């Protein structure tokens, strides 16, 4: 199966989303446990990273729809 070049970014971001969620959750937890960030800041960091990835997927999909 060949993927069109214009959809390559979207597919690569979508495939990397589970790893992004796992790594950002691990990093946020590590920073909270080490006392570098407070608990609420760790949650905000996690949500920011995940929401940014989802936003990029939607943005590129809308941009390449035409």
Image (cartoon, grey):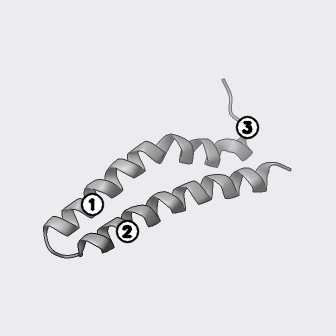
Report how far apart the C-alphas of labels 3 and 2 lie in the structure. Answer: 33 Å
Pointer 2 residue: 45
1 vs 3, front mark: 1
Q: Residue at x 63, y 47 (%)?
A: 10
Q: Position of residue 61 (x, y in %)?
A: 72, 50
Secondary structure of the residue carrying numbered label 2:
helix
Pointer 1 residue: 27
3 vs 2, front mark: 2
Of the numbered discs 1 and 2, the one sitting upstream in the chain is 1
1 vs 2, front mark: 2
Q: Position of residue 36 (x, y in %)?
A: 19, 76
Check if mark 3's residue and mark 2's residue have beta carbons within 8 Å: no
Check if mark 1's residue and mark 2's residue have beta carbons within 8 Å: yes
Residue placed most toward the observer, 3 or 35? 35
Q: Residues within 10 Å of mark 2 (few under 14, many from 20)?
A: some
Q: Residue at x 56, y 54 (%)?
A: 54
Pointer 3 residue: 4
Report how far apart the C-alphas of labels 1 and 2 lie in the structure. Answer: 9 Å
Q: Position of residue 50 (x, y in %)?
A: 46, 57
């Amino acid at each position: 199966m060949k993927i069109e070049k214009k959809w390559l970014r979207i597919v690569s971001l979508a495939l990397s989303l589970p790893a992004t969620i796992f790594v950002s959750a691990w990093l946020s937890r590590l920073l909270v446990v080490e006392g570098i960030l407070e608990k609420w800041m760790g949650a905000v960091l996690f949500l920011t990273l995940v929401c940014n990835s989802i936003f990029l997927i939607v943005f590129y999909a809308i941009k390449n729809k035409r």
